[in-house]
Every structure is written in structure tokens, then in C-alpha cells.
Image (spheres, rainbow, N blue to C red):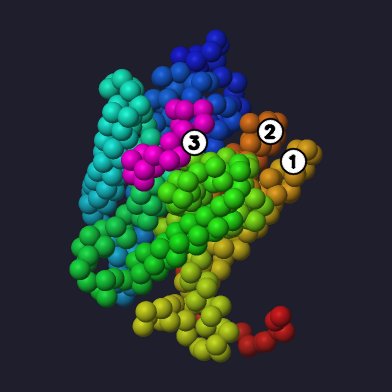
Amino acid sequence: MLPVCRAGPGSAPFMTALFTATSAITTSGMTAVDTATYWSGAGHVFLTALTQLGGFGITTLATLLSLVVSRRLGLRGRMMAGAETSTGLAHGDVRAVLVLAAVVMFAAEAVMATFVAVRLWSAYAVPPGRAAWEGVFDAVQAFNNSGFSLRSDGLVGFVGDWWICVPLTLGVIVGGIGVPVLHEIGRELRRPAAWSTHTRITVWGTVVLLVVGFVAVLVLEWGNAGTLGPRDVAGKILAAFVQGTIPRSGGFNTVDFGAMNPDTTAIVTGLMFIGGGSASTAGGIKVTTFFLLAYVIWTEVRGERDVVVGRRRIAESTQRQATTVALLGVATVAGGTLLLLGVTSDVAFDRALFEVMSAFSTAGLTTGVTADLSDSGRLVLIAMMFVGRVGTVAVASALALNTRQRKYRYPEERPIVG
């Protein structure tokens, strides 16, 4: 709210400042005002700092929570937790976790910033100082899966520029995979067969979702005059790659999401709900949760007793945790959508669902509704951003930390299901 952070006269209203600060610290990137023109240079610096702090803190926190869980268990539990998280770190080595998260983050951001800055300076005649600053800003937003932009139209002006879109999109992917998975991939790059179950599910699940998102956007938006229609074949492929990847938590946009077909919007909403990898900067219920539930369903359909992934049996407690996180996510989004519809009467259901899902998954995308919401509507999205960033990790950790076994068991009963 400091006057120095606003480009215009006076200070920002409390609700605008609260919404923006929450969006930055939760790495959502949702905006109630035009970031490029409403905030001053100092405001942009604050946004960068908050986004970096949110991304670094959340990545580190999510990784450290696994260490907290393992520290509360016995020797057997610690071994199981170590195999499950696959950080490759000693359970008490907090410094190693911090260093690993910092190295991955800053190295990825440095590479992205260099690509963007050089491209802006060489191809768009942006002054070197300004190009460097925009490169750093975009890189921080990309790796932390946020979506603030120093341009009023986001990345729409670069929809056909491979040198800017590809590095930033790859940064979103790397940031959304998670530090534990990146560490294991780096350690066992030549031996994929040695990857843990968590890493396998995250990597291959991410690949599947990337392909699904790309194909869906490319096919469904191919002739849409408001999105991919005016582009040539190469431009359509690039735009589909970016917009098929970004919805899972990135926040950038190279096309107008408000002009997308309803069926594309539905698929994007589903991708936002799934989100990225565990212990990453992405939101959603996480890739591991979604695909674990898919394995559970497949096992039940086949009538098998154990859920097996890559010749490893998944513990029943993990299955229950995945189910709980997913159902709590569904309940949170449904409740948030009803609240938003209740406080904002002129918003269609599909638009309200999209905005709430974007806030919950910290994707930061919008169909143009957020800027016109009342303070009550913005409070709903603020709550969704906070719960989406903190809730699923907190619930999963709480379930693990409170695991206990009763000394007795009740008689078994079989209610009719389905």
C-alpha cells in the first residue's frame, strides 16, 4: 500500500494491495489491476521479491516437511520415507535442502533471464538495462509458476517468438516438477530403472499431461479466430505448446483465454486442478495424487488386491491420503465457486468455476472476470489462493504426522457401494 509502489497518485486501496500480495506470495499471478501500468518500478521489485520468496519458501517447506515426517517415525519409517521422497539427503541436513532448492532455482532463472534479455535487446530494440530487468522479472515468474507480467497483454505480443516462449515454458515445467525429483533425475540420469516410484509417476505423468494439453489446445483451437486461427502452422504449434503447458500452474498467456472454446476451457480447468509435482512451485492436487488415484481405480476395476506401480505396492495409507487430498480439493473448489456466485450475481457458472480453479491451483489465469469482481468476490479468490497453496501440502503432512494404530479393530461391515 506504500505510495511509492503505485504508478499513479496516492496509495493502492487495501483490497487491491491484499489481493496482489496474496497472489505474489502464493505464486498465483492473478491480478485485479494491470500490473504493468498500475504499479511503479518499486512495486514491480516488491512483486518480484514476494514471488521469489513464495516460490523458494514453498519449495523448501514442502521438501522439509518430508524430513519432519521421517523424523517423527522410527527406523523403518525413516527408511520408507527416504525411499518415498527420494531427496537423496540426510533427514536432518536442512542446509543441503536449502542449498539444493536455491541452486536449482537460481540456475534455471539465470538461463531464462539471459535468453529473454538477449532476445528483447537484439530483436525488439529494448535498451540493455530494461531488457535485463524484464528478463529477470519474467524468469522469476516462470520458474515460480506465477504469471505477473510487465506488459499489459502478458506474452501475447510474443506469441510467435520461439526464443522467448520456449525458455519460459521450459522454466515453468522445471519449476513445476519439484526439487526432490530433479535431484534424483540428476543423480540417476542414465538409470531411469533406478528411479523411485514417486519420480516415475511425476516424470511420466508430467509427460502425459503435457501431451494431452498440447493436443487438446491445438485441435480444439485450430480454427478459432480469437486464439490460434490467425497463426501459421508453426505459430499454432508454438502457441498450443505454451497454452497446453501453462494452465497447470504457470500463469502466462500468449492468447486470450476469454476467447477460447468452452470445451478447451473445460480441459484447461481440469489441467489446473491437477497442477504440478509435489515439493514444487506449482499448485493443484499434484500429479502424483492424480495418477495414484488412477492406479487405484484401475486396480479396483480389475479386481486385484494390491495397487502396484512399477513393481512396487502402494501402501493403503498413501492411497487414503491421495483420496483425501483430491476430495478436499473438489470440495474446496465447489464451495469457492458457490461463494463466488453468491456474492457476484452477474458471473456465469463456467467463468466462476474457471476463476476459482485458477486461484486454487495458483495458475493465475483469467477469462477477464477478476478485474470486475467486488471486494467480496476478491476475498473469495484470496481464500482460494491461500488454501490452494497451503492446504493440500498441510493436509497431506498432517495425515502423515498423525498416523497411529488402534489396539483393537471393530467387526467388518460391507455397505453397498455404487
As shown in the figure, which amino acid type bears the numbered disc 3? Val
What residue is drawn where x is 50% and y is 17%?
A: 6
Residue 100 screen position, x and y as percent: 25, 50
Disc on the earlier residue, 2 or 3: 3
| Frontmost residue, 244 versus 235 | 235
Q: Which residue is mark 3?
A: 156
Q: Which residue is mark 2?
A: 373
As shown in the figure, which amino acid type bears the numbered disc 2? Leu
Looking at the rendered structure, the secondary structure element under dot 2 is: loop
Q: Which residue is mark 1?
A: 347
Residues drawn in magenta: 146-167
Q: Is residue 43 left or right of residue 75?
A: right
Given contact means CB atoms under 8 Å apart, are the residues at marks 1 and 2 in contact? Answer: yes
- Classify residue 52 by image quadrant: top left
Residue 183 screen position, x and y as percent: 26, 58
In this view, the mark in front (1 or 3): 3
Residue 352 screen position, x and y as percent: 69, 45
